[in-house]
Image (cartoon, rainbow, N blue to C red):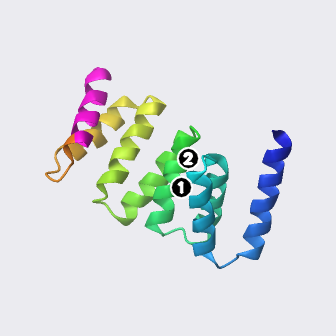
Amino acid sequence: MRLFNLTVILLILLLNSAYAGDVSSLVALAQSSSESGHHHESFETYWLAFRQEPDNIEINFNLGIEAAAISDNESAVMAFERVLLLDPGATQAKIELGKAFYKLGALKTARHYFSEVLSADDLPQQARINIQHILDTSGN
């Protein structure tokens, strides 16, 4: 398994030099890795894309999703906070940020983001139910 990880890292480094300036190729590779369940590789590839386009909302959001998938909640928080700096109304980023803070044990901050999202009129009912469940089970 360790040899596989080393091979993947070398492949990513090779792709970074081969695709320098071609963010769309990096994003496509990251999406493919994610869809295959290779979240570490996807995270690393999104990181390379982020380094080239740090103000890209989609890249930051997906970087946060992949960080959360590998339980790197600190990186997830940073990515979702960047999304909100670029788009303060990004409801899905607020939900994911709340989840990341919740996983970090920062319940007061998580509740803040979840409460803010619950006040949105266009929040899908299932999302509202899921968020309310998290709030109900997290205590005061």
- The amino acid beneath tag 2 is Ala
Please state the horizontal and vertical placement of residue 6, each as a whole percent of the image.
Answer: 83, 49
SS of the residue under disc 1:
helix
Disc tally is: 2
Please state the horizontal and vertical placement of residue 8, each as a whole percent of the image.
Answer: 77, 53
- The amino acid beneath tag 1 is Leu
Q: Write down the region rendered in magenta.
A: 126-140
Q: Residue at x 49, y 54 (%)?
A: 79
**Residue hosting label 2:** 67
Left or right: 137 as drawn, with respect to 125: right
Q: Residue furthest left?
A: 121
Q: Main secondary structure of the magenta part?
A: helix
Nearer the observer, 78 or 37: 37
Q: Which mark is residue 63?
A: 1
Image quarter hosting the C terminus: top left
Q: Is residue 136 above or below residue 48?
A: above
